[in-house]
Amino acid sequence: MEIENRVTVKVLFFARSKELAGTREATICLPTKISYEGLLNTIAANYNLETIKNNILLAKNEEVCSENIDIEINERDSIAVIPPLSGG
């Protein structure tokens, strides 16, 4: 049986996600390879973001993640949670 490699990364919250999570920044332990959906579900469940989950964009190291590929996660990466923005 293969043991899944895991790393700790920083999660940054902005706008509405920051309000719902109750923090600007947190750390989370993730597998080194995860699907976009898996990452989104994990972050939403751990940080009270279920109500806006379907409208969030995730970015790794300031680059928006593609929803249809697995994401390689490394130690010292940061994941940004970008909720929908409103304005005029």
Image (cartoon, grey):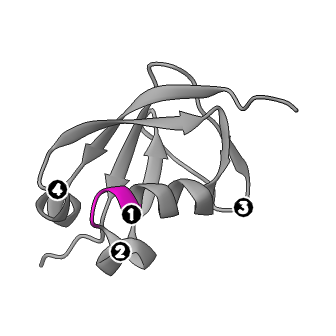
User: Which residue is at a point 45% across and 46% down the rendered structure image?
Assistant: 59
Q: Residue 50 carries which label?
A: 2
Question: Does residue 4 appear to the left or right of 76 in the view shown?
Answer: right
Asked where in the image residue 24 lies, by quadrant, the reply is: top left
Identify which amino acid the numbered label 2 is placed on. Glu
Q: Distance between the residues labelled 1 and 4?
A: 12 Å
Q: Looking at the image, tell me whether mark 2 or mark 4 is earlier in sequence order.
A: 4
- 47 in the magenta segment: yes
Q: Distance between the residues labelled 3 and 4?
A: 25 Å
Please report the bounds of the magenta region as a residue range. Answer: 44-48
Between 8 and 61, the residue placed more toward the observer is: 8
Under circle 4, the secondary element is helix
Give above or below for 8 relative to 54. above
Q: Looking at the image, tell me whether mark 3 or mark 1 is earlier in sequence order.
A: 1
Residue 14, given in percent of the width and then of the height, sits at: 21, 53
Q: Marks 1 and 4: CB-CB under 8 Å?
A: no
Identify which amino acid the numbered label 1 is placed on. Ala
What residue did someone put label 4 on?
Answer: 18
Q: Distance between the residues labelled 3 and 1?
A: 18 Å
Q: Residue furthest front?
A: 1
What residue did someone put label 1 on?
Answer: 44
Quadrant holding the C terminus: bottom left
- 38 in the magenta segment: no
Under circle 1, the secondary element is helix
Q: Badge 3: few (under 14), some or many (20 or more) residues near its Cα, within 10 Å?
A: few
Residue 5, given in percent of the width and then of the height, sits at: 67, 26
Q: Marks 2 and 3: CB-CB under 8 Å?
A: no
Q: Looking at the image, tell me whether mark 1 or mark 4 is earlier in sequence order.
A: 4
Q: Marks 2 and 1: CB-CB under 8 Å?
A: yes
Q: Looking at the image, tell me whether mark 3 or mark 4 is earlier in sequence order.
A: 4
Q: How far apart are marks 2 and 3 (CA)?
A: 20 Å
